[in-house]
Amino acid sequence: MNKQICKYSIIRFQPYPETEEFANIGIVLYATTSKQLEFRLLESKQHARITGFFDPICKAVFVQTTKIIRAEIERIKQLLTLTTGTDVDLYGELIRRREDIIRFSENRVLFSLDPVATVDKLFEHYVYRSFIHEPGHEDKMKKQVRGLLDRCNLSEKYKEGTIGEPAKYEVKFPFVSNISKRKIIKPIHFKHEQPSQLIDHGLEWLAKIQQLEKYTFIKPDEVLFAYDAPDNLQSDLFSAFNEIKAQIKNEGVVMADIKNNDDIIRFADV
């Protein structure tokens, strides 16, 4: 498979033109050689982040808008299969500037071996903001915990450390204390865009604790997960968070909200 030139544009939802604020909701990509059009768009049920930002916009507006733009892109995609050999710029017509609730970014160009995989990667970057998740977001949480320990004169007790043995299994943690009683603090974020991403992240760290326990390197109640929960208490994300939180607690790991300083210090100062 050869690389081909691809044009792409970010699909933006802009319900209030007066403020010029918008939210990225999708990607459309056109492979110029194969005349292949690919796109990814937020599902209408994934409205919480969008409608929350543009409060008090109605959920129905976003749902209906995504249905319309999805149908339009599918129509263009179908037309492209019927216009082989012509010079009709259907992609250009799709993304042209217009005064509408849906806008398209300026056209951008890249080389791609696989347009479908490229669309997925661009979607994760521009819509799901994959670059701010792990480790970036948790790095900020680590600084928050370090500041709290400093203020409570506990920073000397807690250092970055590795639990386990290289020949068996080992995990690095940002805050480990072996003074009088072992204590481990791990900041963990649940600010994901998809319930499956959130659950996978929680299960990944739960599995690490379970494996360390299997080798008797730690006991689960020696570990505190200082978590950052989803913002919307009524969302599918928060339901997923409650599910994985209960699962982690059932294994014996201590859970504390990153904003609850008292709970974190109560655990740390032992």
Image (tube, helix red, strand yellow):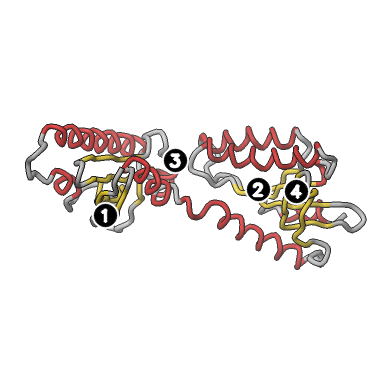
Please give the count of numbered marks on the rendered protein.
4
Is residue 15 at least partly visible in the picture?
no
Q: Position of residue 203 (x, y in %)?
A: 64, 37
Point out the tag, 4 or 1, that comes first from the N-terminus: 1
Of residues 194 and 107, the one drawn nearer to the viewer in this rendering: 107
- Under mark 2, the amino acid is Tyr
Q: Tell me the tag on residue 105.
A: 1
Q: Name the residue type under label 3.
A: Ala
Give the SS element for disc 4. strand
Q: Which residue was labeled with disc 2?
A: 227
Q: Is any atom of residue 139 visible in this view? A: yes
Tell me the CA gap for discs 4 and 1: 46 Å
Disc with the residue nearer the chain's start (2 vs 1): 1
- Amino acid type of the residue that numbered disc 4 sits on in the rendered structure: Glu
Q: Which is in the foreground here, disc 2 or disc 1?
A: 1
Mark 2, Cα crowd under 10 Å, few <14 / some 14-19 / many 20+, is: many
